[in-house]
Amino acid sequence: MTRLLVRGGTVVDETGTRRADVLIDGGAIAAVGEGLRAGDAGRVLDAGGCLVAPGLVDLHAHLRQPGHEEAETIETGARAAALGGYTAVVAMPNTEPAIDCASVVRDVLELAATAACAVHPAGAITAGRAGARLAPMAEMAALGVRLFTDDGAGVQDGRLMRRALEYGSALGATLAQHCEDDSLAAGGHLHEGEWSSRLGIPGIPAEAEELMVARDVALCRLTGAPVHFLHLSTAGSIALVRTAKAEGLAVTAEAAPHHFTLTAAAAAGYDPVYKVNPPLRTDADVAAVRAGLADGAIDAIATDHAPHPPEAKEAPFDQAPPGMLGLETALALGLTELVGGHGGAGPGLGVEALLGLLSWQPARIAGLTGEHGGPVEAGRGANLCVIDPDATWTVDPDRLASRSRNTPYAGRAMTGRVRHTLLRGELVVLDGEAQR
Ligand code: DOR
């Protein structure tokens, strides 16, 4: 194991911001302070002008394995994640077969053992994500699964969701909901509003999301079980979560980068790269997501990284699958659009607040704080990222590590880039290049 000195950076974690060197030995942080030395056998990484932060944690990545390795694998998805600054990702269970029992969880954990970041599978709430009967959550929880979700679909049956909450909370797990009422969303491909009318594409109303948020806030109140709301996209949903939090209910929420950077207008040319579920919404919704990120109504930025191969995304808009890549652009979008960078009209978030949304807050929701999300202090595992906040770059789909190319940000200028990522003390990204 390498002895490594990360020298001259600005350490940012939940406890604050300070200039400090970080000495890493045997996979753990050995010391944090000024004027540290690597010793003869040690390697020195210059972090001058850079931020040294706990590795980012993604609550929501589709790694497609098992079943859709043509789109992504755990290996390629984890590499993309490491390049994006992530040391841990939660892998969504809408694989084929679904991650809905111990044997599939075991398969994923085995594939994850050599990946460039920690991969924690989420388990399905219902068998086969079919929404009819509960999956064997206890046997998955016994293997360390802490989040359960049918993501890609919401659990439509309120009674079943109530039972899942009662059962899941007894296991110490959190249930994460993809909020979409199928009866309202059916047949829709774009947010229902100006752009669905103009383009003649059937819409998905904001209420399809908001009805399920409202129902699950009520079920959270009824059961006392924690509920995490995935990829919230409407002003109404965020208002519901804000009110539920004010009431003291155990709700948390995430938003995806595309919901604070893009609107339905992006789909004006019928390009399916802008098709995603929940759909891109309105300017007012984007403003509400940004406000929610700034005032704590939303706890985490989660990528909803959803790779699809070119042949799938080259279909007509109404036939293409929903989803966008996210792991390699999330941090830069946050720095560029929320903190400042290219003069993005963001809510003026501080870097510390942004990293909270990307690292320690999601680590807490996923139950990973023992290993990920900091603080950066002696004795902790060395899961870190080194970020150059001033580096400028342009997104080139052909240079992404993901196996797919469906980024909606091709050609977009970004400020802020990951320089190094350390997983358990090993450099998995060095000078912006993947090492695994
Ligand atoms: O856009 C999406 N893509 N939303 C989902 O909920 C599922 C995801 C996927 O798996 O492609």
Image (cartoon, rainbow, N blue to C red):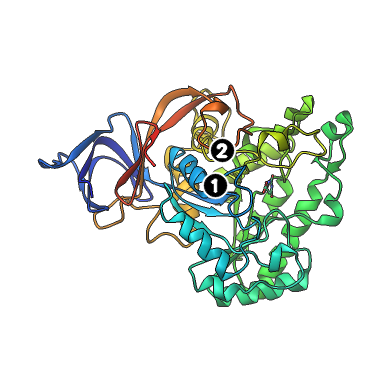
User: Quick one: label 2, few (<14), some, or many (20+) residues within 10 Å?
Assistant: some
Gap in angstroms between the C-alphas marked 2 and 1:
8 Å
For marks 2 and 1 on the same chain, the one whose residue lies earlier in the sequence: 1
Whether label 2 touches label 1, CB < 8 Å: yes
| Viewport quadrant of the C terminus | top left
The label on residue 73 is 1
Q: Is residue 428 left or right of residue 283?
A: left
In the rendering, at what x and y percent does residue 367 appear? 47, 62
Please, what secondary structure does the residue beneath circle 2 have?
loop
Residue drawn at 64 percent across, 42 percent down:
289
Q: Disc 2 marks which residue? A: 403
Q: In this view, does 108 lie above or below 74?
A: below
In the rendering, at what x and y percent does residue 288 appear? 66, 41
Q: Residue furthest left?
A: 40
Q: In this view, does 282 lie to the left or right of 113?
A: right
Amino acid type at circle 1 is Thr
In the rendering, at what x and y percent does residue 147 appear? 56, 63
User: Quick one: label 1, few (<14), some, or many (20+) residues within 10 Å?
Assistant: many
Residue drawn at 60 percent across, 25 percent down:
410
Residue drawn at 34 percent across, 52 percent down:
375
